Image (cartoon, rainbow, N blue to C red):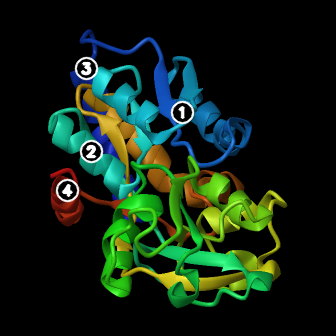
Amino acid sequence: MKKLLSALIASTALSTAAFAGGHSISEFRIGILGGENAQDRMTNNECYRQKAEDLLGVPAKIFAPADYDGVIQGLLGGTIDMAWLGASGYAKTFIADPEAVEPILVAVNMDGGYGYYSVGFARKDSGITSLDDMKGKVFGFGDPNSTSGYLIPSIEIPQATGATMDSGDYFGEVKFTGGHEQTIVAVNNGDVDGGVTWADGLGDWEDGYNAGALRRAVDAGLVDMNDMVQIWQSEPIPEGPVVLRKSLPADVKVKITALTASLHSMDPECAYGVFAGERLGAMPIGHEAYEIIVEARKLKSK
C-alpha cells in the first residue's frame, strides 16, 4: 500500500504540472448509490466529501438519488464525477457508454479478497430455513440495477429451485423493495417473507458479518440479527468498483485515487462509513475484473 501511495503522490506532482493552465473543474460531484436512506448516506460520506474538497481546492458535493439508476445516469450524463458502483451498476454504465467511466479501486475484505455474496434471509420466527420453505411465499429483490439485490440471485436462485422468478411460479409473489435497506426492513417487518441483500460473509452473523448492508442495518439499529436466519448464499461476486469519469483532468483522478486508497490508514472511522464496514483497505482494479458481470447483464437484457 505504501508503494502504491508513493507512486500516486509522485504521479500527482507530474499531473498537476502537466495540467497547469489546462482545463480544470469548478466542483467535484460524488454519487452515492441508493439502498439506504439518503440522510444516512450523506452522513456516512461527509468525512470523505470534506477530505476531497480540501484536497482538490474546489467544492465537493454529495448526490444521493433514490435509486441506483440516478447515479448511473449522472455518470453517463457527466453530472456526477465519482461513485462506488455495484458490479452490475458498473456493467450497465459500461454497456451504455464504454468511455464514460473507469474503475480505479475496489474495497479489500479482512481476508484480503474482494469478493462478496448475495445473501438470502428470513425472520427466524417464520419457520423458514431454506429456499425450500420459501415456495409459495413472498420474495423481495432490492433494486433492479443491484448485483446482489437482483442480478446474481435472479440467475442463481432459479438454478436451485428449477423454476423462474416470475410471481406464482415458485414464489407466491416476487417484488422489488427499492434497495438493500428496504429489503432488510421489509423482511424484519414481515412485509415480505424472505429477500436478498449483500454481505462479505466474514465475521459473525449476529453482527451482520464484517461488512455489507446487514452490517449497516445493525449499526443503524434497524435490525437484530438474532431475529434473522440465513436461507441462501450465492457464489462469490466481485466487489463493485470505485469509478471516476474518464473525462476528468488527470491530476484530479490521481489525487482522488490517492485519497481513496489511503483512507483506511488516514481515517479508519471515515473509511468504516464509506466502505460499509470493516475492511483492510482498497486496491487498484480494472475493467477486466467485471467482464463476466458485463456478459451476465447483457444476457439478462435479452
Residue type, numbered disc 2: Lys
Residue type, numbered disc 1: Ala
- State which mark lies toward you, 3 or 1: 1
Residue 272 screen position, x and y as percent: 65, 59
Q: Secondary structure at mark 2?
A: helix
Q: Quadrant of the N terminus?
A: bottom left
* Residues under numbered marks 2 and 4 in contact, where contact means CB atoms less than 8 Å apart: no
Disc 1 designates what residue? 52
Residue 233 screen position, x and y as percent: 48, 82
Which callout, 2 or 4, points at the residue further toward the start of the chain? 2
Name which residue lies at 49% across and 34% down. Answer: 31
The residues bearing labels 4 and 3 have C-alpha atoms spaced at a distance of: 34 Å
* Vertical side of 165 occupied by 235: above or below: below
Q: Is residue 224 left or right of 197 when viewed as pictured?
A: right
Q: Which mark is residue 16?
A: none
Disc 3 designates what residue? 19
Residue type, numbered disc 4: Val
Residue 209 can be seen, yes or no = no
Q: Which mark is residue 92?
A: 2
Q: Which mark is residue 294?
A: 4
The residues bearing labels 3 and 1 have C-alpha atoms spaced at a distance of: 18 Å
* Residues under numbered marks 3 and 2 in contact, where contact means CB atoms less than 8 Å apart: no
Which callout, 1 or 4, points at the residue further toward the start of the chain? 1
Q: Nearer the viewer, residue 31 or 152?
A: 152
Which callout, 4 or 3, points at the residue further toward the start of the chain? 3
The residues bearing labels 3 and 2 have C-alpha atoms spaced at a distance of: 31 Å
Residue type, numbered disc 3: Phe
The residues bearing labels 2 and 4 have C-alpha atoms spaced at a distance of: 7 Å
Name which residue lies at 38% across and 84% down. Answer: 161
Q: Nearer the viewer, residue 145 or 41?
A: 145
- State which mark lies toward you, 1 or 2: 2
